[in-house]
Each structure stands twice: as C-alpha cells, then as structure tokens.
Amino acid sequence: MVGSRRPIVNLSLITICCLTFVYEIVISRLAIIGGGDNLAISVLFLKLGFIPSEITNGQEFTTLRNVFFDLSIKTPLHNYLSPVTSLFLHGGLMHLLGNMMFLWVFGDNIENHMGHFKYLGFYLVAGIVATFSHWFVNPVSEIPLIGASGAVSGVLGAYLLTFPYNRVKVLVVFFLITVIQLRAMWLLALWFVWQIIQGSFQLGLSDQVSVAFFAHIGGFVFGVIVVGVWRLITGKKIWPSNPLISSDDVKYWRGRPVN
C-alpha cells in the first residue's frame, strides 16, 4: 500500500470539471445550472461531447442549421479525442455535484493506492472504455454524451476490490432524512445493480433517456477487471479477506487508517 499523500490528481480533475462548468454557466447565461440550455451550450456539447453516430458513420457533424443561419459545430480537436473532452462537461449543477461527490469520496483513496500517474491514466482510460460501452449499445445516436460518470464509475469499480470493507456514509431520504453507514462493498453492489436495472429499461430508448447507464456499467466493470488482474499479477487475492490486519490492504479514509 502506498503511504498517505496529497491526492493532487483527483483534486485537479475536480477543479477542471468545476471550472469548465463555470464556463458553461457563463455561455448559457445561467440556464445550465438547472439543466436547461441555449444555442451556445448546445453548440459546445456538439463540439466537445461524444456523438456515437460520428464514430459509426465515420463522418463528423460540422454544421448546425436553424431557421435563421448555420452554425459551425466542427470539433476544434480531432474527433477521436471527444471521448476525453466529453468527460469534463456536465449538463447541470446536480449532474456535476453528483459526479464530483463520488470522485471526492472515493477517488483520493484510489490515487493513494495507485500513485498519481497511474491513477490519471486509469481514470482517463476508464472514461474512454465507458464512452465506447455507451457507443456499443447506442451506435447511431446523435445525442452528445457528456459527463465524468463513466470515469468515476471506473474509480468505483476499483474501490470495490481495493477497499470493500471501508464504511461509507450514505444519505437516505425515506419519510425521514437520515445518514447511515454501509460497507463500501454493499453500497457499490447496490449502485451497480441499479445501473443494470435502469440500463435494461433503456435498451432501444437511448435518445429518450438522459442518463447513459451503459457508460456507468462499462466503466465500473473496467475498474473491477483492472484491479482484479493487477491483484492476480502481484500475487494477492482478488477479494481481500481482512484488510485491517493485512499489510497489503490497510484501510484508508482521506489518507488516514480507519476502523
């Protein structure tokens, strides 16, 4: 286990996403805060979001036509970089806060475990794999895919096999609002099952559903596979038996050992 250190990559990813959203707020004239949009934000998403049909057809959308004039939506970078650029865009304040909350809670532990550069590479590749998981299910969709959810899901998958016994505080709203503590393995298992259930309902309805559940599923599975294979290569059990007493799997929370 790598010792405690400042999770500079995780903090940088959160900062970039937040600063990008500030830019979205400015160009949308505050509309994006509530999940709304205008012409400027639509153009931004079309330019930097991932559009499955562009990859499927091998042809980039370059012009957005409306009643009065045509607008260029040609991607400023190579079109094949959109699986990365799309990771830093969000469609509303709650979309941003949800992803950043998960990244804040789980990402620093994984960065401490992997190291800065490995974590950055893992995060970006998880996001790309998640994006193409969405493409595989929705190859002809013309709706831009945006958000860090796929990459964050990869972090959650990695967390499941690295710190399954950590306790995580969960806000529960059911008649009363309360906070409970769950083992990470139960929380993440419930989250993953929910993605599968929702994703199964989404099949054939990709353009009518605003959440890319198969991107979540693909990212999560990627995280589990990467950590599982790495544990096998390094001679560890895929599922840690007792991290409290194992020198290889000491539990950390914000860089500090916890019970």
Image: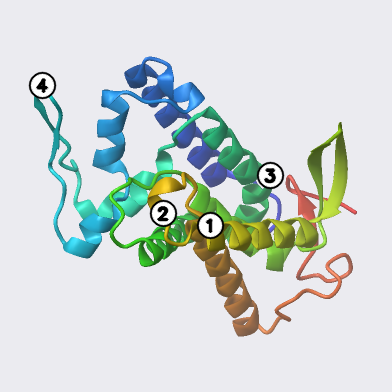
Badge nearest the viewer, 1 or 2: 2
Q: CA distance from mark 4 to mark 2?
A: 29 Å
Badge nearest the viewer, 3 or 4: 4
Element type where label 3 sits in the image: helix
Quick check: marks 3 and 1 in contact, CB under 8 Å? no
Q: CA distance from mark 3 to mark 1?
A: 17 Å
Quick check: marks 3 and 4 in contact, CB under 8 Å? no
Location of the C terminus (image quadrant): bottom right
Mark sitting earlier along the chain (3/4): 4
Question: Where is mark 1, residue-wise?
Answer: 216
Q: Is 248 displayed left or right of 32 in the figure?
A: right
Amino acid marked by disc 2 = Ser
Element type where label 2 sits in the image: helix
Amino acid marked by disc 4 = Phe
Q: CA distance from mark 1 to mark 2?
A: 14 Å
User: Where in the figure is residue 91, as x and y percent of width and height?
Assistant: 44, 34
Residue drawn at x 32%, y 20% is 27
Mark sitting earlier along the chain (1/4): 4
Quick check: marks 1 and 4 in contact, CB under 8 Å? no
Examine the rendering and report whether any part of residue 138 can be seen: yes
Amino acid marked by disc 1 = His
Question: Where is mark 2, residue-wise?
Answer: 206
User: Where in the figure is residue 215, as x and y percent of width and height?
Assistant: 48, 58
Question: Looking at the image, which is closer to me, 213 or 105?
Answer: 213
Q: CA distance from mark 2 to mark 3?
A: 30 Å
Residue drawn at x 32%, y 46% is 143
Mark sitting earlier along the chain (3/1): 3
Badge nearest the viewer, 3 or 1: 1
Question: Where is mark 4, residue-wise?
Answer: 68
Element type where label 4 sits in the image: loop
Question: Where is mark 3, residue-wise?
Answer: 105
